[in-house]
Amino acid sequence: MLQGLTYLQDEACEIEGVRVFGSPWSPAHGDWAFQADRGEPLRQKWQRIPDNTQILITHGPPRGILDRHVSGVPLGCEQLRERVLRLRPRLHLFGHVHESRGTHRHDGTLFVNACNCSFGYKKQQPPIVVDWNDGELLVQPSPPSAEPSLHSFGAWDDLVVKYGTPREVRYLSAPEQRLHLNQGHVFWLAVMSDGYRRGQVRFRQAGPQDDVTDRGPDHCHRQWAFTFGVPVEHDWLEPLNCNPWGHYGEVPKLPE
């Protein structure tokens, strides 16, 4: 798979006269490879970056640049920021903080957080393409999303007003769950987010054989099975696109 490619682990290479350096290190966070403590241990790692580097590739971001966790806490490395601002490479590429994907220009450097996974580790973010033309950098526009445009509205609230407070099926007894499934009263509320507080909420009818205890693999892509306890109406089953955080807070929850 690596045929024709160069893997850089604290190493430099030159491509058509452009000097590139790559390093996998990031501040200690969880149990991952290539991590070091903040402060002097990381400062020593970044001292390996040659002064003449034009393109710098690191796993994680510098402090304060495209590094904010979904909670708002910056996760970048202070020592990397010190080194980058002194060296001023033309381009700094990194990832690690999925929800801060994007580009930023500062003091002659183009910073690119190029994560292709969402906050929930879904490989769904389009590539960021940068053209290098004799040192001039141009970021190509991202391809248009295949998803419809997003908007907020009170569809969920309208259903609650019309049919009453829903109940999460997983809190019902097994016989009650089966009864509602067989009667066609159970629906999935599927919440899908790209990690940037944009996403979709979709309603669909649950099938009689569905496992309604399944809530999805992570908090950005979850499914809730619920019942209003009333007969099915066709217009419920249409996809409803909106911003889920407009109604449910950061981690979507059904109303009580």
Image (tube, rainbow, N blue to C red):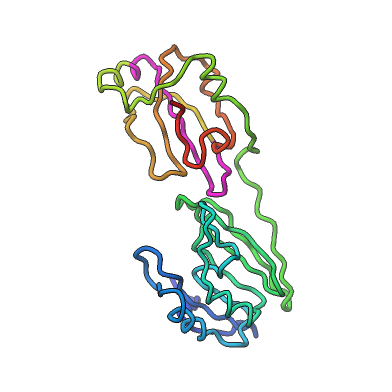
Residue 45 position within the rendered picture, expressed as x and y whole percent measured from the top left: 47, 82
Which of the 4 quarters of the picture holds residue 86?
bottom right
Q: Is residue 219 left or right of residue 125?
A: left
Viewer-side residue, 174 vs 245: 245
From this view, report whether residue 128 is shown above or below residue 37: above
- The front one of 122 and 228 is 228
Tag count = 0
Residue name at image x 58 percent, y 63 percent: 113
User: From the viewer's perspective, is residue 25 above or below residue 157?
Assistant: below
| Residue 160, image x, y percentages | 51, 19
Q: Quadrant of residue 150?
A: top right
Q: Is residue 79 one of those drawn in magenta?
A: no
Image position of 88 (left or right of 199): right
x and y, in percent, of residue 23 in the image:
49, 77
Q: Where is residue 231 shown, x and y percent of the image? A: 44, 12
Give whichever of 253, 190 is nearer the camera: 253
Residue 7 against residue 217 in the figure, above or below: below
Which region shows up in magenta? 180-200
Residue depicted at 51% across the width and 35% down the height: 248
Which residue is found at the position 49% from the left and 81% from the top? 43
**Quarter holding the C terminus?**
top left
Q: Along the line of sight, which residue is nearer the eye, 210 or 61? A: 61
Q: Is residue 235 above or below residue 125?
A: above
For the N terminus, the image quarter is bottom left
